[in-house]
Image (spheres, rainbow, N blue to C red):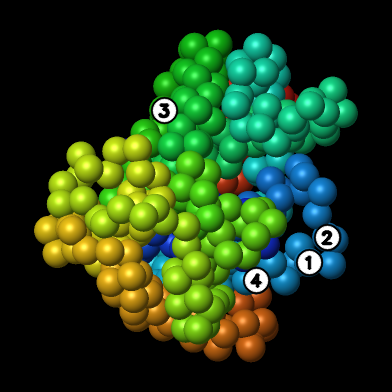
Amino acid sequence: MNKRIFSGMQPTNRLHLGNYLGALRNWVKLQDDGYENIFCVVDLHAITMPYEVDRLAPATREIAAAYIAAGIDPDKCIIYPQSAVAAHSQLMWLLSTMTQMGKLERMTQFKDKAGKNAERAGLGLFAYPVLMAADILAYKATHVPVGEDQKQHLELARDVAATFNTRYGVEFFPQPEPMILGEATRVMSLRDGTKKMSKSDESDYSRINLTDDADAIATKVKKAKTDPEPLPETVDGLKGRAEADNLVTIYAALADTTKAAVLAEFGGKQFSAFKPALSDLAVAKLTPITSRMNDLLAHPDEIDRILKRGADKANTIATPILKETAEIMGFWRT
């Protein structure tokens, strides 16, 4: 079987440094590693929480622009909106009939997002992992780049694939393997090193957005929370220093090096010396992406053309897989 990668991001708010370092940059590297790459804008997932109707389509274009600006080549990869391929929703329903409620109730992301109002949460939020499984299995993806917070959902997708194969006595769906890549798989907030950098954080100073200009990046790095001690000279010295660890991790990822190498250069120095270097590095790496994004967003028709072409390619792959799934399950087909 050919190696096929599937991954996606929600069109909610703006993508930030954590999205770039933890996912986008690694996706770019995978383009030339012999995989068939499918990168989706998962707009169906975006409506499981309250959202602005008028922002959904523009946000979808913005995420697609970020993909391309970061280096995803639409001639090498498939880029498309999830809602443009009906197989995602249809396969989700078929797979939901063999997904146990108990497993969904144990999903930590549902507990986090629903909070104390779990009984009032929508079915879509509860069944989010089943749709994620359908996203992956609709293409028989073999590998999925994921962050630590999505590993539980991928494990459910593997379980659903195994359940389907066992129930119907077939070897139809592969069990997709997780791919956790890079030095910065989990970038933390600039205001609280114990919390993940998030698009939904109320403070814009908690993250560096891919649309931030050089001045905004410099200001956010300067204001990033630290502690009064100088940087340690070894990685072990970062233990118990969440903010210091986060900034060193970000530097290492942007520089394509290791935390040990960063500390070999900056160990013993104060943050007043380290932060300007980190700021300069972030500006150098992100400014070309921001500029390319702005160019793309100035031509929404071109983004729509790319998304339409990607959706056509995605449908060509997913529709026959959905049809065969239904036939295996016994549905009548012409």
Instruction: Kindly report which numbered mark, 2 or 4, lies closer to the viewer in this rendering.
Output: 2
Disc 1 or 4, which lies upstream in sequence? Answer: 1
Which residue is identified by label 3?
Answer: 175
Asked whether the residues under the numbered discs 2 and 1 touch, taking CB atoms below 8 Å apart as contact, a structural biologist would say yes
**Quadrant of the image containing the N terminus:** top left
Q: Is residue 42 visible?
A: yes
Which residue is identified by label 1?
Answer: 55
Q: Position of residue 23 (x, y in %)?
A: 42, 54
Distance from Cα at disc 3 to Cα at disc 1: 35 Å
Q: Is residue 184 visible?
A: no
Distance from Cα at disc 3 to Cα at disc 4: 31 Å
- Three-letter residue code for mark 2: Glu
Q: In this rendered view, identify the residue nearer to me: 129 or 196.
A: 196
Disc 2 or 4, which lies upstream in sequence? Answer: 2
Q: What is the crowding at mark 3: few (fewer than 14 residues within 10 Å), some, or many (at least 20)? A: many
Instruction: Kindly report which numbered mark, 3 or 4, lies closer to the viewer in this rendering.
Output: 4
Q: Position of residue 175 (x, y in %)?
A: 41, 28
Indicate the secondary structure of the residue bearing disc 1.
helix
* Vertical comparison of 178 with 63: above or below: above
Q: In this rendered view, identify the residue nearer to me: 305 or 104.
A: 104
Q: Which mark is residue 61?
A: 4
> Which residue corresponds to the image point at 84% horizontal and 67% vertical from the top-left?
54
Q: Position of residue 233 (x, y in %)?
A: 15, 52
Horizontal side, residue 40 vs residue 262: left or right: right
Which residue is identified by label 2?
Answer: 52
- Three-letter residue code for mark 3: Gln
Distance from Cα at disc 2 to Cα at disc 1: 5 Å
